[in-house]
Image (tube, helix red, strand yellow):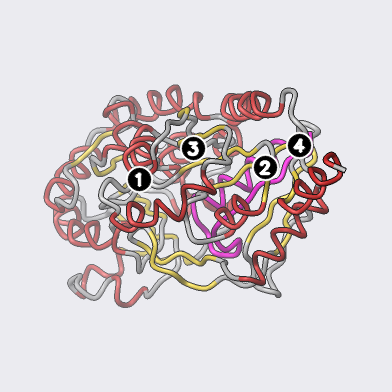
Amino acid sequence: MKIGIVCPYAWDVPGGVQFHIRDLAEHLIRLGHEVSVLAPADDDTPLPPYVVSAGRAVPVPYNGSVARLNFGLLSAARVRRWLQHGAFDVIHIHEPASPSLGLLTCWAAQGPIVATFHTSNPRSRAMIAAYPILQPALEKIRARIAVSEYARRTLVEHLGGDAVVIPNGVDVGFFASAEPKAEWQGRTIGFIGRIDEPRKGLPVLMKALPAILAEVPDARLLVAGRGDEEEAVAALPAEMRSRVEFLGMVSDEDKARLLRSVDLYVAPNTGGESFGIILVEAMSAGAPVLASDLDAFAQVLDQGEAGELFTNEDAAALAAAAVRLLGDPARLAELRERGSRHVRRFDWSTVGADILAVYETVTTGATSVATDERVGLRARRRQG
């Protein structure tokens, strides 16, 4: 099958949607399918052979964050050229309602189109206001996927229609087989995420850290991600700042090794999450998980059975739970076992098969994807 996948966000900026698309593409390629991914990317960004650049992205406030998106006449022309050269059996658009390549592709393409909705935002006035503009494009979509029940609910409430829920996938074996790193072991707490994005929750964790260190003085916090490190620890007492180690951006291999090494992974995110792929990666690596009780996180953690939850934005609750867990090796071992068992449902062997089944429903008996111009030309030829 020839599959075209559209990524709305800049390929060179790490994010859950980009990682999901990358892993899906590589899973499909391993199965023998031909895959091309269209994504925003700067000219000097090294790209895998299956990624086609749609040009430089610009920062745009979106879904409580700042996303790097690609939009405009030049981008639209590149979308059409990609569609014409690809002769795809199916197009898979991610975040088609965002002002980026997905929406441009919806406008330009005709044929088997699948869309995945990642956003969970129950009160998006912008999405409601934009619906009349989005509707003609979204009506072309033949099958809809939501990465969680909360992403599905956002879709239903704002855009109408429905979607099958297929979660984000992860290569469980990749994380499970990673080698722990000795210097990252020993009463360590892990955090991975953008340091300067408040909704990722690092300020909540920093606020909880003094109470954690008061009870567990030999504990350390390992932080992986980009952002202002000095600002991140500014509110900590000076004598405690040495207990925080910033690792900067880490490779996929080091991320897996970090998650295999820590005693406890903390996800203090405060909102805007529709799934929680980092929780799945942590469980795959055997890391006990402590996460804020966002609806999406609770679903990923099986309502607290596969990992513990604390009240969102409550630093005292986070500290109390972390202290209790770090002092209870038996409970940590139990969470490791439960998480490792629960996470199997998110492996690409299962998620990839579900996505391919959706592709098959829209391509059976259908012609390949074409641009509007080609469809119109064929219609005129038939009339002649």
Residue 250 x %, y %: 53, 60
Say which element carries label 3: loop
Quadrant hosting residue 225: bottom left
**Mark 3 vs 1: CB contact within 8 A:** no
The residue where tag 2 is placed is 91
Q: Residue furthest front?
A: 384
Which span of residues is magenta-colored? Answer: 1-29
Would residue 198 appear left or right of 284 to someone viewing this image?
left
Q: What amino acid is at disc 4?
A: Asp
Amino acid type indicated by mark 3: Ala
**In the foreground, 289 or 367:** 367
Point out residue 141 in the picture as x, y percentages from the top left corner. Answer: 57, 39
Residue 89, numbered label = 4
Q: Given the image, on which type of amino acid does mark 2 rest?
A: Ile
Q: Is residue 254 above or below residue 340?
A: below
Q: Are marks 1 and 2 in contact (CB under 8 Å)?
A: no
